[in-house]
Amino acid sequence: MTGELPGLATPEEREQALHAAVHGLRETDAMASASVAFLPWQRNSLLGLAALAVVCAVFAPLATLIVVMAVCTFGYIAVMVDRVVLFTRGMARDAILTVDDETARALPDADLPPYTILVPAYGEPEVVGDLIAALNGLEYPRDRMQALLLLEEDDAPTIEAAHAAGIGTAGSEHITIVLVPAADPRTKPKACNYGLHAATGDIVTIYDAEDIPDPLQLRRVVVAFGSLPRSVVCIQAKLAFHNARQNLLTAWFTMDYGLWFGFLLPGLMRSSAPIPLGGTSNHFRRNVLVAIGAWDPYNVTEDADLGVRIAARGYSTAVIDSTTLEEANPDVINWIRQRSRWYKGYLQSWLVHARRPVSLWRKIGPVGFFRFTLILAGTPVIACLNLVFWFITLSWVLGQPALIERIFPAAVYFPALIALVLGNAATVYMNLVACRENDRPDLLIACLTSPAYWLLMAIASAKGCWQLLRNPSYWEKTFHGLGTSEESAS
């Protein structure tokens, strides 16, 4: 059922909600919107650097190549060292919030605040039935839980599947279909912004259509918010996959998430650095979410962007030990589509927040600014550069060209060797430790073969960087419903 919702009851309110969903952030703070990928000074600076590099390459080719190799090597080492530091901090027992089952259930229903769940879905009729089962499995009083299924009004198959699954019938009255008007940009954050106008909860969270959240997650978050200072306005739950053993790609993906959500994000929380949120299972204080402009509909990683904006406004994010299961992409092409969008969005977010570098430096501090740059800009750039440096390494192993020897003098060669050997070994080691701590011995082969996964990352990053130049706000759809359950894959 669609019904009449607060804020969306009349055509005028729906038109206003759509306008705000698309243009709200851009009109209130144009500098915070990714509707323009590059400001003139950013574009001109990049073009100037490219022109300078070309001129230097023409008049001093060897020196230019040496400088480029040195800068790239420094970037590799900086990213490697920072990841190890974050991993070490994330290993601490108190790095992640923990609310046990007994404490979560002990909170009386009368003390639970109203909660709104936003579920954006587009072209996903095959997962709607599982979605309803997951939402009905949440242990939260139905009269205090509002679930809004955000469907594009021209997505007839998903709308029909939602009605066929019984949304709005007995037992599912708390789930309501909200039809999002078809308008560009066709992105998840635009749908969430539109749905936010109908939200009644004090706390708002997002679940993807294929998610299976921990049944006690909402209660755990309420308890956590009650014990944390008011400056904590977002709590990010952990993400994992239910089809890790479907094939090697899903095992790699699960390994990747285990390290990121189990250790690196908690390490970021302990370092007071901006936390790039995951695309789902982040829980917000609604009043603050609205006040800071909600999601940017033009940013294809609206979650990472919002995490930085939260920190820049003086607020903070916590990570809680509650897991939402998702579907890992089992198809290589589908995975590259998704990962390239993430890399493009990281660069989008960095470009947006780097528009006011001095202001951001003052707000989040030098360490926070350094980590913001290493994660949002460094992650996709380093992944893309891997293609170049792997080619150089392979060329040296096969033929030892004199040019490679000349562009790697001792001052560059030995740091590059450290980055190659210790950096790769440290990454494999962190993945192994994460899998051990997460009790996933079945991912041992994935950890040991992870360099092949890095190759896929490099391809996706190159694609994302190219798309940033050609079509920055294009949301490349990830198809779901391709996974198998853990039981059927075992």
Image: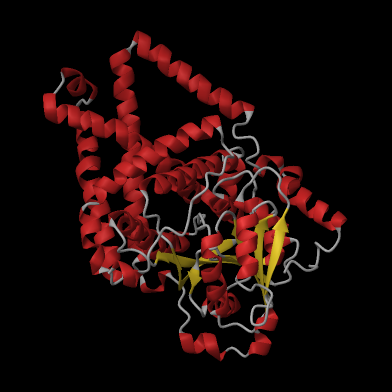
**Vertical placement of 334 versus 395: above or below?**
below
Q: Where is residue 296 in the image (x, y as percent from the top left)?
A: 64, 48
Q: Which residue is drawn at 46% across and 20% down?
A: 50
Q: How many marks?
A: 0
Residue closer to the observer: 326 or 420:
326
Q: Where is residue 430 in the image (x, y as percent from the top left)?
A: 27, 58
Q: Residue placed farthest to the top in the image? A: 59
Q: Which residue is drawn at 72% across and 65% down?
A: 287
Q: Where is residue 160 in the image (x, y as percent from the top left)?
A: 64, 62
Q: Residue at x 29, y 23 (%)?
A: 66
* 40 displayed left or right of 326: right
**Vertical placement of 18 versus 320: above or below?**
above
Report if residue 204 is visible in the image: no
Residue closer to the observer: 430 or 161:
161
> Looking at the figure, which quarter contains the C terminus?
bottom left
Judging from the image, the colouring scheme is secondary structure
Report if residue 459 is visible in the image: yes
> Looking at the figure, which quarter contains the N terminus?
bottom right
Residue closer to the observer: 413 or 195:
195
Q: Where is residue 452 in the image (x, y as percent from the top left)?
A: 26, 46
Asked where in the image residue 379 lies, by quadrant, the reply is: top left
